[in-house]
Image (cartoon, rainbow, N blue to C red):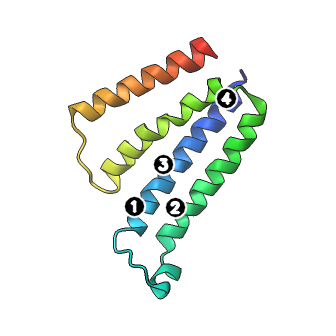
Amino acid sequence: MKLWLLGLVAVCSIIGAFGQIFLKLGMKDFQFAFEQLIHNWQLFTGLALYGISMVLYLFALRQAQLSAIYPIIALSYLWVMILGLVVLKEPVNAYNIFGAVVIITGVGLITFKGG
């Protein structure tokens, strides 16, 4: 598999993780009021980032096997954990770190050995 495709999908996972953070920020004081909804730039930023991530991912899907590139999307869990710690000040404990190591190991095994 081409290395640039792996990079593209990794970028998709990072963009998607930023999208998730913006969705979380946008939902902080969310109310179902039209006036608040149209001024909720964080929510719209999150949706836009998810959309950009999806379009790039669709391009990658045309170029490579799904079973080889899809596991890389799992890295978004890692990015969200890191961004949650840095941006949202959410706690990270030993279980989170162990889970991240398992995800990274699994992505590596599937992508580089199985694809």
Residue 55 is tagged as none
- What's the residue at 55%, 31% (across, down)? 72
Mark closest to the chain's N terminus, 2 or 3: 3
Q: Are marks 1 and 3 in contact (CB under 8 Å)?
A: no
Considering depth in this image, is 64 or 8 the residue closer to the camera? Answer: 64
Please, what is the three-letter code of the amino acid marked with disc 2?
Gly
Compute the Cα span from label 1 to label 2: 8 Å
Circle 3 — which element?
helix
Residue 17 is tagged as 3
- What's the residue at 35%, 56% (across, down)? 87
Between circles 2 and 4, the one closer to the viewer is: 4
- What's the residue at 46%, 21% (across, down)? 106
Mark closest to the chain's N terminus, 1 or 3: 3
Question: Quadrant location of the C terminus?
Answer: top right
Residue assigned mark 4: 66
Between circles 4 and 3, the one closer to the viewer is: 4
Location of residue 36 with respect to 47 vertically, above or below: below
